[in-house]
């Protein structure tokens, strides 16, 4: 039976009239219309993807390429291909293991400032209502607005062993920035003071997303405030805490870089040289671009593995809460 339009003849009988070929859109036109309907989201993402490729993936590819060459950063100096020699030198270097240990110390030292203190402050600040709460959160966030180099200059004066306020308060002269036992502590505390406000805002946002009816229902059932916090609020806040742990692991070494470069330059005796500062030192102090690039590649691969594990953990916590 031929498809067509059914019309009535003058005698009242139905007659099938063939459908015009122009009424059926060709396959190319149908595909084009579907492409136009699906295009807007990709058009919005295109500028971001272009910037991501230009400023992230392209330099990353160039870093991997440079890690197999030897170059001293001079434009007149030739770039020589050396294969895996840079990686062999890097793995045999004694300062790599020391910098990895210092990086671990920084991460562990930053966790109280990015996780423990923000959670406590976030829980306590929920009791502050109205404008006082907004002022309180603004004061906590204020150190984040201070430029790291400017903050480092102020802290250098505060920690000065001869005229610093810190030594006068504790009543004992300590050369905080020039002793191996205290330099790393000073860097961690200053960085934590700078970052804690941001972490508090993240925790506050996570607490805002928790339905207060859960705690109210627990109170009706006889649970105390501490019990509701322990068994309801903290488990529901676990995705936010996992995010803060992920940020601490990935960014602690980067956060400390401007303070280390301003206050200690990796010293004394390498006590504050973490992996992030080490790869910068290879590239811009030793003028060994290939070795610095190799350190950057290993740094990138290692932290990708750690980030993947933490992301999987965060996903499991999110699904568990749902």
Image (cartoon, helix red, strand yellow):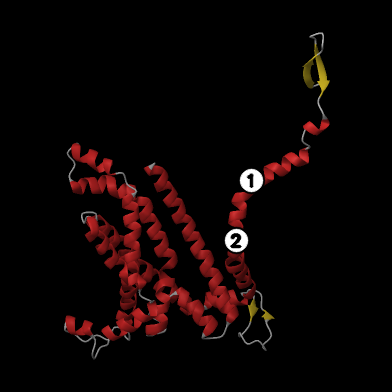
Q: Which residue is mark 1?
A: 38
Whether residue 266 is visible, yes or no, is: no
Is residue 264 or residue 51 the one in the foreground?
51
User: Closer to the N terminus: mark 2 or mark 1?
Assistant: 1
Quadrant for the N terminus in the image: top right
Residue 78 % position (x, y)? 69, 85
Is residue 97 or residue 154 the one in the foreground?
154
**Image check: 81 left or right of 292?**
right
Instruction: Give the Cα distance between marks 2 and 1.
Output: 17 Å
Residue at screen point 44% across, 49% down: 315
Residue 136 % position (x, y)? 25, 63
Instruction: Give neighbour class at mark 2: few <14, some 14-19, many 20+ (Cα, 10 Å).
Output: few
Residue at screen point 58% across, 80% down: 289
Whether residue 19 is visible, yes or no, is: yes
Residue at screen point 68% across, 81% down: 80
Residue at screen point 24% across, 59% down: 131
Task: Indicate which disc residue 47 carries.
Answer: 2
Q: Secondary structure at mark 2?
A: helix
Above or below 41: residue 195: below
Q: How many marks?
A: 2
């Amino acid at each position: 039976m031929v498809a067509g339009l059914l019309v009535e003849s003058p005698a009242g009988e139905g007659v099938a009239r063939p459908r015009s070929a122009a009424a059926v859109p060709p396959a190319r036109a149908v595909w084009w219309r579907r492409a136009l309907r699906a295009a807007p989201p990709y058009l919005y993402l295109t500028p971001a993807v272009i910037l991501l490729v230009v400023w992230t993936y392209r330099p990353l590819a160039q870093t991997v390429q440079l890690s197999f060459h030897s170059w001293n950063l001079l434009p007149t100096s030739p770039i020589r291909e050396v294969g895996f020699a840079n990686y062999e030198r890097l793995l045999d270097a004694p300062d790599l293991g020391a910098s990895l240990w210092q990086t671990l110390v920084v991460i562990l030292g930053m966790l109280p400032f990015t996780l423990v203190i923000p959670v406590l402050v976030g829980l306590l600040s929920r009791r502050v209502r109205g404008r006082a709460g907004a002022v309180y959160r603004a004061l906590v966030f204020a150190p984040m607005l201070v430029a790291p180099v400017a903050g480092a200059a102020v802290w250098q004066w505060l920690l000065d062993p001869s005229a610093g306020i810190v030594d006068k308060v504790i009543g004992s002269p300590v050369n905080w920035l020039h002793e191996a036992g205290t330099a790393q502590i000073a860097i961690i505390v200053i960085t934590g003071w700078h970052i804690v406000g941001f972490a508090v805002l993240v925790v506050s946002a996570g607490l805002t997303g928790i339905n207060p009816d859960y705690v109210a229902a627990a109170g009706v059932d006889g649970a105390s405030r501490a019990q509701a916090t322990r068994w309801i609020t903290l488990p529901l806040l676990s995705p936010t805490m996992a995010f803060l742990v992920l940020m601490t692991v990935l960014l602690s070494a980067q956060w400390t870089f401007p303070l280390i470069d301003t206050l200690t330059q990796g010293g004394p005796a390498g006590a504050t040289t973490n992996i992030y500062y080490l790869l910068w030192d290879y590239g811009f102090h030793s003028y060994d671009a290939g070795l610095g690039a190799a350190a950057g590649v290993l740094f990138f691969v290692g932290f990708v593995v750690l980030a993947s594990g933490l992301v999987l953990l965060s996903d499991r916590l999110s699904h568990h809460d749902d």
